[in-house]
Image (cartoon, helix red, strand yellow):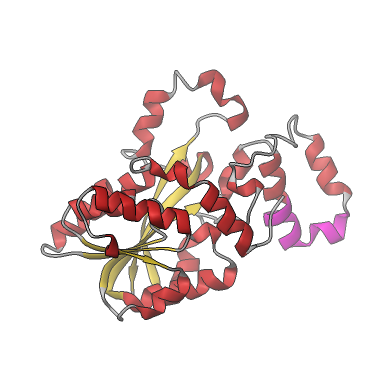
Amino acid sequence: MAHQFNAKKTQEFFDNMATDFSVATAPRDEIFLDLILPQYIEKNPGQISALDFGCGGGALLLKMTEKGINVQGIEKHDNLCQLARDRLVQAGYNQAKIIKGGVKELTDLPPESFDFVILMGVFQYLPPEDYIQSLNNIHNILKQGGHLVASFQNALFDFFTFNKYTVDFYQEKIVKPLGLDKLLGDSLIDDFKGLMTSPEKPKYSSGIARDNIYVRTSNPLTIADELKKHKFNLKQKYFYNLFFTPRLIENKYQDKLKELKKQFEIKRSTEWFGYFMANAFVVDCVKE
């Protein structure tokens, strides 16, 4: 079931999940650090400035700081913000690098002041109006030719899960936009479920965002056009969190697939398999 945005529920969810952000960098962070950043450094030697918007527990921000990047963080959720500040202090850096705030605070930053604005695990949790506003604000604070690097939830992956998310994808992305619900009636979704053996799985979990709060999924086939409307030119897409089998049967094969999965996290993250088999992707785009 797709949830409507609720600011209070979103705040509570991320405050409760803060301890999960105490881990080291995630695959999406490694994509930035190992694939995107080196290309930029090679062509643009010297001091690099970056904003990590929605910096979470601060793992990526700390890595960038250690690389000598002049990085600022913004985090709106109380527990995550404190976790990020604590992480910086423990590493010997100033916690003032992290601002407590959200989309509104983007307007307080000087125009054309960053080479990179990075959003990892942020866009999918913003309501539509904040999503559009943040893109406009980011365009304003990026230098000419600066990069927006952001992660998105892959909508196409839902059609590979053969579970309740597949039902949601069909209903929200195909049936409603095409008006099939009005043309064919409510029985269409029941008939669609009848083609599957697990249309109600997986069971509800308090730790899964999509079971509890609003989460936007984005189509990697159309994301370039979407970003172009806000004056960003897509340079490359990188897929991560790739699954070679539908998730309901992954446990049976996961040990044998560990090495192959590791290859796709970084080295093969641009291959076409990711369009359907990765649950998320990172975009690297340039300000016009």
Whether the magenta-drawn stretch holds residue 181 is answered as yes
Quadrant in the picture for residue 40: bottom left
Q: Residue at x 69, y 54 (%)?
A: 2
Tell me the quadrant of the picture where the C terminus can be found.
bottom left
Residue 270 visible in the current orientation: no
Q: Nearer the viewer, residue 237 or 212?
A: 212
Residue 284 visible in the current orientation: yes
The image shows residue 36 at horizontal and vertical percentages of 27, 53
Q: Is residue 252 left or right of residue 42?
A: right
Q: Is residue 272 above or below residue 106?
A: above
Q: Is residue 138 left or right of residue 133?
A: left
Q: Nearer the viewer, residue 262 or 92?
A: 92
Q: Is residue 198 above or below residue 251?
A: below
The image shows residue 217 at horizontal and vertical percentages of 57, 54
Q: Nearer the viewer, residue 89 or 235?
A: 89
The image shows residue 265 at horizontal and vertical percentages of 37, 38
Whether the magenta-drawn stretch holds residue 174 is answered as yes
Q: Is residue 49 left or right of residue 241?
A: left
Quadrant in the picture for residue 145: bottom left
Give the residues drawn in magenta, as a range: 171-185
Secondary structure that dominates the magenta span: helix
Q: Residue at x 72, y 49 (%)?
A: 1
The image shows residue 153 at horizontal and vertical percentages of 52, 51
Q: Residue at x 49, y 75 (%)?
A: 133
